[in-house]
Image (spheres, rainbow, N blue to C red):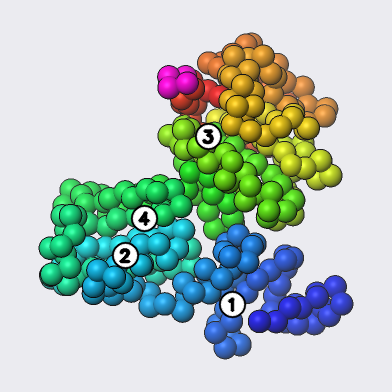
Amino acid sequence: MLSIDCGADELPCHDFGVSKLPTIRMFHGRNQSVDYQGARRSDAILQYLQRIQRPLVSELSDEASLQSFKAVDDVVFIAYASPDRTDVLNSFGELAERHRAEFSFGLVSDPALLQSESIRSPAVVCYRPGDETATTFSNFKDAEPEALSNWLHESSRLYLGELTHANQQRLLDRQWPMVYLFADSEAERADFRRSLWKFAKGHYDSLSSVTADPLEFPELLVKFGLDARQMPRGVVHQLTNDRIYPYPFGRGISSNELTKWGLDVWQGRIKPWMPAGVTTTYDDLGPTKVATRKISVAKFPGMPNAIKIAGHNHDEL
């Protein structure tokens, strides 16, 4: 491991084409490298290092190795398939190649071990040990070619995960409202992930909830009108109509407070934030109307407007 201060020594940063700081790059010799896209915290980086040192797909041949591997990472994918199912094995191998830097991949093909598991093969199971969740994909016969890949993207989403450059676009592509929780320190973000886990789980089917490092995503602070000196902060962003609702600075960020505030937003008692100088009219601030812009502002990928509040379906948060 080598740390380079590009401000004090520009030459190596220029030679290796480093254009954004901070950059973490893994080298396999001088000419083979990949930029690390995960969370900027020690445990996530260590998981990444362990991930890339394992085989692309780890063969699990006994019960002990299988149970151990299920908890080896935040997100683990295990294929259960006999050796003659080359179609499943090839598709799974392609996914592992694409997502090796993010997730861990294992394979159970031993007939005795397959028989001992209560999973009907062929199947791929996503284990999220921190969320105490496992989801299964088994429709290989009738599924579209991208079905397994799409399932991987959705099943790997944690109840309340960390926003990274690797998962950002996937989350936006879901076209659902985003809940951002910004905090300067990893300790604060980890506390959010613990204290708001049940809140995020309860809204998992209607919101994408993430913690975010403001230093890693300064462009989001500008986009949401947040002051980097006022942390921690929360934001709800509805991308279908580009409405931005910053959570009040200084108000405690707890499950109860977020729920109360979210209900106020949904019932139209809180107006969306808009950049200074932008004139916007709203026919109605309630959940079923769309804003009418007098002048154009930046557009972002859209998100749908279905959300559950208190166990009922509503149009928007």
Which percent across, then down, holds residue 220?
70, 45
In the rendered structure, does residue 103 fall within the stretch colored magenta?
Answer: no
In the rendered structure, does residue 313 fall within the stretch colored magenta?
Answer: yes
Mark 3 closeness class: few <14, some 14–19, many ≥20 residues within 10 Å: some
C-alpha separation, residue under disc 3 versus residue under disc 1: 36 Å
C-alpha separation, residue under disc 4 versus residue under disc 2: 11 Å
C-alpha separation, residue under disc 3 versus residue under disc 2: 29 Å
User: Which residue is identified by label 4?
Assistant: 127
221 horizontally vs 152: left or right:
right
Dot 4 or dot 2: first in sequence order is: 2
Mark 2 closeness class: few <14, some 14–19, many ≥20 residues within 10 Å: few
Answer yes or no: do the residues labelled 4 and 2 have beta carbons within 8 Å? no
User: Which residue is identified by label 3?
Assistant: 199
User: Which residue is identified by label 2?
Assistant: 67
46 horizontally vs 314: left or right:
right
Dot 3 or dot 1: first in sequence order is: 1
190 and 176: which one is in front? 190
Does residue 91 appear anywhere in the picture? Answer: no
Which percent across, then down, holds residue 171?
51, 45
Going by the numbered disc 2, the residue's amino acid type is Gln
User: Which residue is identified by label 1?
Assistant: 26
221 and 291: which one is in front? 221
C-alpha separation, residue under disc 4 versus residue under disc 3: 20 Å
Up/down of 205 relative to 184, above or below: above
Going by the numbered disc 4, the residue's amino acid type is Tyr
- The residue positioned 63% from the left and 33% from the top of the image is 254
